[in-house]
Image: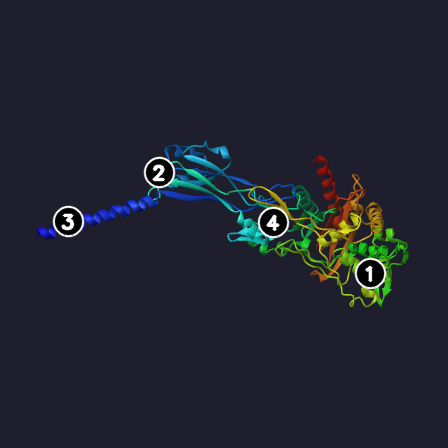
């Protein structure tokens, strides 16, 4: 009996020791807790190094279960829910209106965190993310670069095995590369982008776009497409019949009369600037009758007057004189039928130029001559074409990436696009003078401003598609540049299902150009 009692006593003592050790191990393992408060990924900057992401500040209060905390949280709307968690001994994090809402103490610590997006501005360029990374735009195509510089803000505190906070211990905040400076620098100018987006809203361009280029470099300073992507409600965006996920500035459309400058340039490049045509309201080519926008006819037209009033028969006849080969070569040199790749497969549509074998009749050549037929182009391509005329004949492929900032905050340039000689300066000088006349006296008069002289061209392009009532869908355009004396900016606006370039888009050009002019004077 004694031996048995001794054995059971030894066994009981051993079980007690093992249980005590296990309890101590569990307590030790759960002493230090980590709580990720917020995470960031690489920044995206504008051309002036202003942040386009990680701008909006939020304030998070980290509250320990102390007597002092129970008193202070009474001012919060959700204080009852917070009290319930504090009574369980848990640490609670909650958003507060501003950083100094609570006085910093060992009981309550308030931190500044950052939201990825401030609003839906630049939604088609920046794109958006989900839990796995970038899904659209720069976020998607430059995901690896932006992910490399991710960071987090971590709260570390001591608690017992049941997760109850040990109040005697200090709460520590660890910054694991959170909100660091590294990232991508775009050519976008944040202020010009806002001007452009507001102009589309102010003139009810609900399905359309506007793009602004620096004519001396080809850099995209602004690119706005409507409707925008609502990052807060992607399912609503997905079900919108107006296709918000389509970046219209990078998508190909029928262009209409804004292409007439290409036909004019092809003529001028061959040394002919004296072509005269008598418009009678229509013209017959290869048994196809083409009408002018003035069915009564414009009478005798030269290049300046034909551009000014957008006379179709003039350019139909002119294109047949120029010939298919010269017309196509000029279009290609001005960037048409060319896809732009901004890097990592972030690219635009290519558009469409008819093959020379398809231009096998005067009707086919004439169709191209005033921007119709199989011709498709993106608003970005049209803007680049007008930028070439503005700068005196050098074509720059549009660019979007300016460079990169590393973790040491050093900037490295992505390199500037090399210009390609596309037109003679004499050609551009004549076109500039003629496009100035278009705004002063022609179809572009709604774009006129008294602040400076500018150049531009309207268009209303047939799409070959029809509304439910049987009317044809037309896209209205305006393309131009300013100021006339020393052009700096080229702008292209396009509205889907528009009335005319004169009524829809020219006023948008006026607002954007005037506000950029004012902005530059204030800078």
Q: Earlier in the sequence, mark 3 or mark 1?
A: 3
What residue did someone put label 1 on? 326
> 62 and 325: which one is in front?
325
What residue did someone put label 3 on? 9
What residue did someone put label 2 on? 166
- Residue 168 lies left or right of residue 319; in this view the side is left
When asked about the image quadrant of residue 254, the answer is bottom right
- Label at residue 126: 4
Q: Position of residue 188 (x, y in %)?
A: 66, 46
Q: Earlier in the sequence, mark 3 or mark 2?
A: 3
Type of colouring: rainbow
Q: Report how far apart the C-alphas of labels 3 and 1 lie in the structure.
A: 107 Å
When asked about the image quadrant of residue 345, the answer is bottom right
Mark 3 or 4, which is nearer the eye? 3
48 shown above or below 1: above
Q: Find out whether the residues at labels 3 and 2 contact each other: C-beta distance under 8 Å.
A: no
Q: Can I make out residue 262 in this image?
A: yes
- Residue 164 lies left or right of residue 264; in this view the side is left
Dot 3: what SS?
helix
Q: Position of residue 275 (x, y in %)?
A: 90, 56
- Residue 425 lies left or right of residue 108; in this view the side is right
* Quadrant assignment for the C terminus: top right
Q: Position of residue 93 (x, y in %)?
A: 44, 41
341 shown above or below 82: below
């Amino acid at each position: 009996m004694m031996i048995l009692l001794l054995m059971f006593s030894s066994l009981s003592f051993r079980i007690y020791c093992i249980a005590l050790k296990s309890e101590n191990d569990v307590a030790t393992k759960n002493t230090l807790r980590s709580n990720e408060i917020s995470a960031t990924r690489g920044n995206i900057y504008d051309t002036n190094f202003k942040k386009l992401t990680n701008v909006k500040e939020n304030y998070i209060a980290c509250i320990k279960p102390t007597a002092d905390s129970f008193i202070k949280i009474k001012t919060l709307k959700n204080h009852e829910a917070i009290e319930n968690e504090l009574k369980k001994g848990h640490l609670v994090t909650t958003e507060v209106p501003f950083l100094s809402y609570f006085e910093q103490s060992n009981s309550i610590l308030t931190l500044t965190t950052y939201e990825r997006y401030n609003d839906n501005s630049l939604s088609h360029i920046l794109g958006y993310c989900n839990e796995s990374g970038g899904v659209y735009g720069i976020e998607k195509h430059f995901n690896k670069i932006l992910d490399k510089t991710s960071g987090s803000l971590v709260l570390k505190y001591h608690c017992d095995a049941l997760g109850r906070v040990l109040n005697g211990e200090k709460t520590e905040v660890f910054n694991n590369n959170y909100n660091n400076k590294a990232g991508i620098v775009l050519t976008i100018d944040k202020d010009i982008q806002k001007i452009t987006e507001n102009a589309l809203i102010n003139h009810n361009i609900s399905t359309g776009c506007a793009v602004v280029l620096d004519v001396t470099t080809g850099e995209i300073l602004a690119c706005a497409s409507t409707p925008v992507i609502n990052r807060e409600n992607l399912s609503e965006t997905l079900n919108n019949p107006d296709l918000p996920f389509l970046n219209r500035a990078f998508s190909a459309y029928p262009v209409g009369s804004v292409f007439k400058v290409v036909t004019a340039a092809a003529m001028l490049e061959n040394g002919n600037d004296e072509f005269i045509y008598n418009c009678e309201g229509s013209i017959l080519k290869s048994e196809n009758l083409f009408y002018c926008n003035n069915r009564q006819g414009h009478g005798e037209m030269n290049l300046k007057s034909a551009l000014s009033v957008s006379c179709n028969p003039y350019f139909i006849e002119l294109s047949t004189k120029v010939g298919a080969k010269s017309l196509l070569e000029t279009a290609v040199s001005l960037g048409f039928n060319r896809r732009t790749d901004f890097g990592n497969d972030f690219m635009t549509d290519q558009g469409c130029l008819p093959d020379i074998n398809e231009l096998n009749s005067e009707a086919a050549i004439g169709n191209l001559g005033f921007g119709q037929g199989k011709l498709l182009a993106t608003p970005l391509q049209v803007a680049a074409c007008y930028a070439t005329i503005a700068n005196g004949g050098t074509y720059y492929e549009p660019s979007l990436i300016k460079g990169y900032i590393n973790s040491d905050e050093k900037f490295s340039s992505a390199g500037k696009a090399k210009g390609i000689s596309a037109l003679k300066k004499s050609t551009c000088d004549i076109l500039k003078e003629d496009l100035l006349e278009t705004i002063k006296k022609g179809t572009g008069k709604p774009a006129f401003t008294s602040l400076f002289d500018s150049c531009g061209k309207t268009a209303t392009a047939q799409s070959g598609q029809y509304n439910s009532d049987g009317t044809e869908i037309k896209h209205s355009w305006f393309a131009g540049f300013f100021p006339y004396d020393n052009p700096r900016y080229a702008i292209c606006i396009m509205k889907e299902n528009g009335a005319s370039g004169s009524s829809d888009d020219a006023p948008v050009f006026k607002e954007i150009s005037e506000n950029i002019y004012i902005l530059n004077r204030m800078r």
